[in-house]
Image: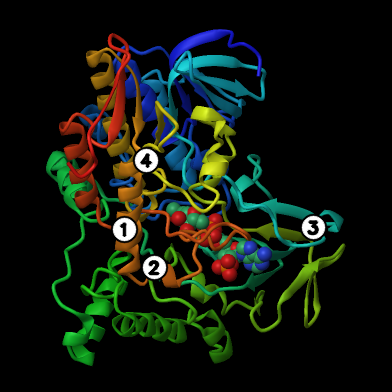
Amino acid sequence: MTEPRREVDAVVVGAGFAGLYAHYRLRELGLSVQGYEAAADVGGTWWWNRYPGARCDVESMDYSYSFSPELEREWTWSERYATQPEILRYVDHVAERFDLRRDIQFDTRVTAMRWDEPAERWHVSTDQGDEVSAQFCVMATGCLSAPKELDIEGVDAFEGTVLFTSRWPHEGVDLTGQRVGVVGTGSSGIQSIPLIAEQAAHVTVFQRTPNFTMPARNAPLDAETVQARKAHAREHRQAMRDSRAGVVVANPEVSALSVDDDERAARYGTAWEAGTLYAMIASYTDLLVNKEANDTAAEFVRSRIRDVVDDPDVAERLSPRSHPLGTKRPCLDTNYYATFNRDNVTLVDLRATPLVGVTPAGIRTEATEYELDVIVFATGFDAMTGPLLRAGIVGAHGVALAEKWAAGPRTYLGIATAGFPNLFLITGPGSPSVLVNMMVAIEQHVDWIADCIAYLRAEGAESIDATPEAEDEWVEHVNAVASRTLFPTAASWWMGANVPGKPRVFMPYIGGFPQYTGVCDAVAHDDYRGFSVRRASTGERSATAASA
Ligand code: N01
């Protein structure tokens, strides 16, 4: 690393929803801010993921910022679940309205961040040759921004076109008349397969693990619904923040095993019709903690698959049986299961006939070779830790984040990690993040971080660092809460199980959003309990125990 050429108060890495709001709040505090973003413009995940069918699966009116009532009043979503282009138009509007692009350098990836101990500042380097010194660094790098490295042989030799849902060409792709193979049946595959099938001559879906997906029941938003929400926007936003997952869902009251089959079927039927991610799992109190209870819901979904899919063998292969409902991220879809009734769609079950690799002509399984013109990889992400570890972060005493997290991520509240002072993670591992509506999680984190920085400035403090004791306690709590659920039983990306060699740790905090925000607020209220704060005037560190 060379000497820094410029000094700023804060560097914000990333210009998606989290990064943009961080710019807004830090600027409000009067800080000088430098933003870096690898993409050519704002939008984060919505800038990259442009595959056919990409849309949010939290309702548009909830999947938007709440910090500005004026913004809420002036923006009107057109559909219950907005498409990627509409979400990007919204991001663009926000960036323009609040002049947020001003301090962001695009097409620039942060390649190294080193804590300069004597100076008590971060030294940040980029792939464009920038060398900047900052008192604070805010990692707005997203949870699903680092595509998983492909673990399939032979891709380079393929003579057709290779596409990734996570890096879809901006000019779009015409698949008319093409033989397309899609590898992966997570949210990206499930959203894109029906639309690819409408265009392509033939689609071969290579499925390793069938996923639970529910019909989105997407529709245009009518003016009355929009007006009614806008009229009660403040109350609704508060209800979202008070809810377990950042969306308003009635809390279940009884066990699935306490009612008879008819009552359960009626309840699941209503949830299935609701067209939301959370309705099924929120039907009963014990679906995520009791396998027997969960089986009743999982079997209900399997019976719906059998209703829709004509071929009983295909229906069975599409039916998830390897994990309980909700323990891998479920999906919302439009016409996914019905797509397998089309003459131009073939399902290949990779559990029955494992994938051998890509050949020059297509994809080979242990049974046969499928000739293809295009392969679409919807193979997922090195989630949550990937984006942070790829930024080359080295903290106090020269310890790399990758070294510290070798056995899995360790954070205090998912916001800070001990030994990395003045480094703030937005929706980091150990926070509710991907288990809740991301917009709610992002705003809460950015607000907490901005308040913390304001506190440090008011106190004349130079730096703040989580204490190892507070971090240990929090990690223990995060693990203890997860271990009481069915989540750790599934090979999910939440567990790091999708990336070969990644430590298996349940990364998000499952204790519930209000419980989590209660802890964050109490920590701040108690002079940042569990953190050590160094004040310039005395040169001394003060720290209070996390459980004080
Ligand atoms: O990725 P995934 P995604 N051979 O990891 C398969 C969010 N999101 O991009 O399960 C064969 O879920 C893999 O199989 P398996 C959302 O949070 C939101 O779809 O590992 N198959 C799996 O089927 C979501 O959860 C939206 O056995 C291979 C698939 O690829 C998250 O992003 C839209 C393989 C990967 O599924 C990630 O979703 C899109 C291999 N070698 C995404 N490697 C919204 O709506 C992987 N697979 C809002």
- Location of ligand 1 given as a quarter of the image: bottom right
Q: Mark 2 against mark 4, which lies toward the viewer?
A: 4
Q: Is residue 158 left or right of residue 544?
A: right
Type of amino acid under label 4: Pro
- 1 and 2 marks in contact (CB < 8 Å): yes
Pointer 3 local density, CA inside 10 Å: few below 14, some 14–19, many at least 20: some
- What is the spatial separation of the Cα atoms under label 3 and label 4, in whole angstroms? 44 Å
Residue beneath disc 2? 487
Type of amino acid under label 1: Ile
Looking at the image, which is closer to me, 132 or 378? 132
Quadrant including the N terminus: top right
Residue beneath disc 1? 510
- 1 and 4 marks in contact (CB < 8 Å): no
| Marks 3 and 4, the one that precedes in the sequence | 3
Residue beneath disc 4? 468
| Marks 2 and 4, the one that precedes in the sequence | 4
Q: Position of residue 86 (x, y in %)?
A: 44, 41
| Marks 2 and 3, the one that precedes in the sequence | 3
